[in-house]
Structures are given as C-alpha cells and as structure tokens.
C-alpha cells in the first residue's frame, strides 16, 4: 500500500505561444496582413492580447495547447472533469445527430462537426432573416458506446466548442465504409487495450468502429418480459411527476400521457432491466417509435454495437487547421465520428482494463481540515489541526501531544478503510467479476492518472475557478487539493505564455 498527500502535475508538450494568439486575432480580419504583421511587429503582441482579454474576445486564445500528465485522487478528478478541455477533430468530420419531435418522430441528420458548432453557438436564420436559437438543436443526441456492454445508446450533448488551431493527423482503417478521420495527435480511440491516443497507434493496430452485433443470446423469455413490465408499471407514480418531460422529445405532458422507458433496452442489457437509474419518462409517440426500432433489430437478431477494424498505416500529419470537439454528459464520454468511436475531454486510466495500484490519499498535517463555526457553503472556512488545537489548549506540550494523537488516529482510520476496500476489490477480481463492477468498492481517495490537453482560454477559466486569490474580480474558494494542482498548472501557464498570463492577472484573473 502506498500513501501520498500531494498531487502530481508534469509537463508533456505545448504548441503555440503569445505571438500565435495575436496572429490568430489579426488573421481574423485579414489573413495575409495578419501573418505579415506578426512577423514585422512583434511588440504589438502585448497590446492585442490585453485588448482581447479586456473586451472578452476568447476565440484567439484557443490557438495553442498545453499537455500535461496529472496524478490525483478521484475526488479531485470529479471536480476537474467539469472543465472543458479539448481533444480535437477536423471541421469536416461527419457525425449523426438524432432528435425526436412530437409530430415528426425520429429524425436522423448527418452534418459536419463545424456545422453543428455553428448551429449550437450561433443559431440559425429563419425566413425573415432573424437569428433563432432553436431548442431542438440543444436537445439533439449522439450515439455513444456503453463501454461495459459494447452496445450503443443515445447520449446527450453538453457542449460543442472550438479547440483552436491544431496540427491535424490522418488516420485510415481497413473498413470499407468507416475508413478515415482527421484529428489531433492526442485524440483518444477505443482499442481492446482501452483508450489510446492517436500518436500511440501503429499500422495493424485495431480500433472500434460502429457496427452490428449478434443478439441471439439476448432473447428474453416471455414470462420474464411480463414480470419486467409489471415491475416497470409499478414505478410510474413514484418516478413520473404529475406534469413531466419526455426525455427524448423534451416536451411536457401530463402523467397519463407518459410511460417509463428503459433507456438501455432490456434486449440490449438484461442486467439493467430492474435498474431505476435506467428508467426515464417518455411520451406515447416517442415510446412507439423507439419500441418499433428495437423490435425490428431484435427480430433480425442484431443490435447496434461496436466492431474491431485494423489500421491501414501509421497516422500521418497532413496540415494545421481549426479544430472542434463535443463534450458529452455522463456516463459515457465518447461519440461516433465518421463511424469511428472517439473519446472526448480526457484520456484517464481505466479500471476496466487494468488493476488499479493501491495508492491512496492521506492529507498532510498542514492541510486545513477543521470546520469553523461560521462555515458557509460556497465560502468554506477551515483551520489546520494545529490552529484548532491552539484554540482549545494553552499548554504548548499538551498541544503537540494532542496534535500528534489526533492526526495519527485520523490516518489510522483512513488506512484501515483503504486496506479493507482494496482487499475487497482484489477478492472481486479473483472471482472473475467484471472489472468495471469490481472497482465500485474502491474509495474516492484512490489515485488515478490522466493526460490533459487544453488551450490558454480553458486554462484561464480553470485558474479563475480553482485558485483562491483575494485580488481576483470574483474570489473562488476551491478544494485545497485542487488548488495544489491548479498552482502547478499556473506555473506552466506563466512560463509558456508570459504575456497572456500577465494580461490575465491585470484583468482580475478573468478569462474571456
């Protein structure tokens, strides 16, 4: 067993500098003039960067990237995952969105990720020339892969964003249809060994693409289907409000016009048949459309799932261009692009493919951990163990003894809990239990590692929320461990983008 009290952040790679950000701003007005100005007037860089931050022009700050390795406890990652950071796909990447209308039913639309970004952020123009931000755009869904069953589900889009100018690489497969994609070198692809970055792939390696899987083994006996139906009906009053939303078309209905639907169908995954988390309200029209589709697949003994395909050659660099990415809601952070299953946001180590090391977090004595009387949510206030004991005991020797005894007792309890949970985890693996299920007994204090890639704009938003500075325009009160990680990221940011960093400080630590 290994115990740590810190957070590890290591620099991996970077692309671009302050001049690149200024160039991106100048190019937006005139490409040739911008390039020429960047070469002839490097002193203008500071002025344009300060102007961009002051007036909240954020796009030019996406023209660069910083990549680093982070090893931190799971409870730190839970907060870090809320931040938008980017892997990157070329603008011509094709994706398939699905939406459900009250009258139109199920609609499948093929579009490029650049077009989706434009609709998501800029809206569309109606016949009168007015800009409309349609609700239907925000409720579109993408096909995502359930990484436990390797069957497809529909996932909700959280955000569509630009990732800035990046080097783009060409990946080509031997699949007759889903044969190629353009993306950055750090974009993740699903392989039999888990998620792997593009730069780590070689010729004859295999990745997962969209396909069909045999469902003969998923046939459900009639008696069991009836029992599942009875149980589902019993949950209606409890899980559907008197006036609720259909989770597919996002329209409001009275309870009488809503059913409960298995998001992951019973045919696709029988283990989720009695899982309340897998039940959501659905209107009668959407329920009929979805049921017909599932029955059609079932009758042909096929379900939508993943297939393995080999790469034709090692990915090669082709050009530098504007890139995009999509952030998906939990639980599956992936989607289908050009028919290929790709990752979004993070490339974190997965307990589904490896046995996690017994490395756990124990706070150091310097960590503020004792709540004070005027503690408030959103503005937490803690004291170190030493400061707390000073307020209780006057004698110095007694303070030292009390501090050591209290800290030792706390550490002993944490170690005991960690050891018990990890031994349970190993026993579950010995029983040949699914690693994705066996890991559920592990505490959030276990360490996990991740490769993080983000642009200067994302870094500034991250620092504004995850660092505490009384001089900031909006003072944040982040988790202490998160501050440790954010402090190391800030050092890298100040080193590689000094002009941008100084402008960030002058702007009250506010990002665009």
Image: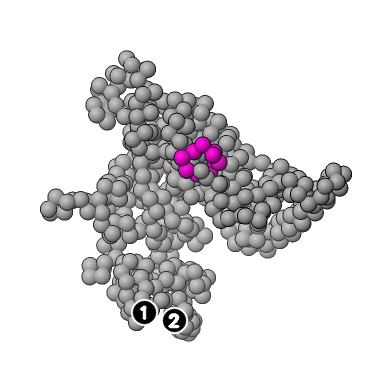
At horizontal 51% and vertical 72% (from top left) the residue drawn is 275
Residue denoted by label 1: 255
Q: Does the rendering let one see residue 408?
A: no
* Front residue of this view, candidates 294 and 387: 387
Q: Residue furthest left?
A: 128
Mark 2 residue element = helix
Instruction: Relative to 429, say whether 56 is above or below.
Output: above
Residue 135 drawn at (x, y percent): 28, 59
Q: How many marks?
A: 2
- Secondary structure mostly seen in the magenta stretch: loop
Residue denoted by label 2: 237
**Render colour scheme:** one colour
Q: Is residue 13 left or right of residue 512?
A: right
Distance in Å between CA atoms under marks 2 and 1: 8 Å
At horizontal 17% and vertical 51% (from top left) the residue drawn is 130
Q: Which residues are magenta?
A: 465-474
């Amino acid at each position: 067993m290994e115990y740590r009290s810190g957070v590890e952040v290591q620099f991996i790679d970077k692309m671009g500098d302050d001049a690149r950000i200024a160039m991106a701003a100048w190019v937006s007005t005139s490409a040739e003039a911008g390039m020429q100005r960047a070469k002839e007037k490097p002193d203008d860089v500071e002025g344009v960067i300060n102007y961009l931050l002051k007036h909240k022009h954020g796009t030019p700050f996406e023209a660069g990237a910083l990549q680093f390795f982070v090893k931190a406890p799971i409870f730190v990652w839970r907060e870090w995952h809320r931040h938008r950071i980017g892997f990157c796909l070329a603008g011509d990447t094709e994706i398939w969105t699905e939406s459900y209308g009250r009258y139109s039913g199920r609609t499948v639309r093929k579009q490029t990720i650049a077009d989706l970004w434009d609709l998501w952020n800029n809206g569309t123009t109606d016949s009168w020339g007015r800009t409309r931000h349609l609700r239907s755009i925000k409720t579109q869904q993408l096909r995502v892969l359930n990484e436990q069953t390797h069957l497809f589900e529909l996932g909700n889009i959280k955000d569509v964003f630009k990732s800035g100018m990046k080097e783009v690489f060409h990946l080509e497969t031997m699949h007759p249809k889903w044969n190629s994609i353009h993306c950055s070198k750090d974009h993740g692809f699903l392989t039999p060994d888990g998620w792997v970055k593009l730069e780590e792939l070689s010729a004859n390696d295999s990745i997962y693409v969209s396909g069909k899987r045999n469902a003969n083994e998923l046939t459900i006996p009639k008696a069991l289907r009836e029992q599942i139906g009875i149980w589902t009906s019993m949950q209606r009053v409890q899980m559907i409000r008197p006036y609720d939303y259909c989770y597919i078309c996002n329209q409001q209905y009275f309870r009488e016009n809503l059913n409960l639907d298995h998001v992951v169908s019973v045919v696709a995954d029988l283990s989720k048949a009695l899982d309340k988390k897998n039940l959501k309200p659905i209107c009668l029209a959407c329920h009929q459309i979805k049921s017909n589709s599932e029955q059609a697949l079932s009758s042909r003994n096929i379900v939508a799932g993943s297939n393995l395909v080999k790469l034709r050659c090692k990915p090669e660099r082709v050009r530098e261009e504007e890139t995009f990415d999509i952030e998906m809601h939990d639980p599956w952070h992936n989607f289908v692009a050009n028919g290929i299953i790709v990752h979004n946001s993070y490339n974190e180590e997965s307990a589904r493919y490896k046995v996690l090391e017994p490395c756990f977090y124990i706070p150091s004595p310097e960590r503020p951990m004792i709540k004070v009387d005027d503690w408030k949510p959103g503005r937490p206030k803690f004291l170190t163990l030493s400061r707390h004991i000073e307020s209780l005991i006057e004698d110095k020797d007694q303070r030292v003894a009390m501090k050591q005894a209290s800290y030792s007792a706390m550490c002993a309890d944490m170690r005991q809990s960690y050891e018990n949970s990890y031994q349970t985890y190993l026993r579950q693996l010995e029983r040949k239990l699914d690693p994705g299920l066996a890991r559920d007994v592990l505490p959030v204090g276990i360490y996990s590692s991740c490769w993080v890639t983000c642009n200067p704009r994302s870094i500034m938003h991250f620092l504004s929320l995850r660092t505490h500075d009384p001089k900031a325009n909006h003072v944040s009160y982040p988790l202490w461990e998160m501050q440790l990680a954010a402090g190391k990221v800030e050092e890298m940011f100040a080193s590689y983008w000094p002009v941008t960093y100084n402008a960030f400080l002058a702007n009250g630590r506010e990002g665009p």
